[in-house]
Amino acid sequence: RAHRVVIKPGESSVPHTHAVPVVIVMQTAGTVASESPAWQPINGPGDYAWHIGPGPHVLHNRGAGEVELVEVEVRGATP
């Protein structure tokens, strides 16, 4: 499954979980942070990060503009 996520400046996504690893791909300019383990900030189109899970995570828009990301659940993946 894939999910489109749009976050306004200074706001955060709702806490959510995934049953499998997720790759999060940035679609727009901006900076997104998370407290997910091993997270590295993502900073622009095509940049990506993994959320291994299984716990919840929240995405935070640290930039001045709206950001759009795509979260793709990857069954059977090992990041």
Image (cartoon, rainbow, N blue to C red):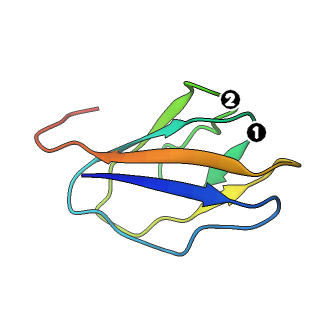
**Left or right: 46 with respect to 29?**
left
**Left or right: 34 with respect to 25?**
right
The circle drawn on residue 51 is none
Q: Amino acid at mark 1?
A: Gly
Position of 40 relative to 10 (above/below): above
How many residues crowd around disc 2 within 10 Å: few (fewer than 14), some, or many (20 or more)? some
Q: Position of residue 77 (x, y in %)?
A: 18, 36
Q: Position of residue 34 (x, y in %)?
A: 60, 55
Q: Which residue is mark 1?
A: 30
Name which residue lies at 21% across and 54% down: 20
Q: Amino acid at mark 2?
A: Gly
Position of 56 relative to 76 (above/below): below
Name which residue lies at 61% across and 47% down: 68
Position of 27 relative to 11 (above/below): above
Q: Position of residue 73 (x, y in %)?
A: 26, 48
Residue sticking out furthest to the left: 76
Name which residue lies at 76% across and 39% down: 30
Q: Give the quarter of the image for residue 61.
A: bottom right
Q: Which residue is mark 2?
A: 44
**Left or right: 21 with respect to 7?**
left
Q: Position of residue 75 (x, y in %)?
A: 14, 44
**Left or right: 27 with respect to 2?**
right
Q: Secondary structure at mark 2?
A: loop
Name which residue lies at 41% across and 70% down: 56
Pick the front one: 32 or 40: 32
Q: Is residue 13 at all visible to an observer of this figure? A: yes
Looking at the rendered structure, the number of numbered marks drawn on it comes to 2
Q: Is residue 36 at all visible to an observer of this figure? A: no
Pointer 1 with pointer 2, Cβ within 8 A: yes
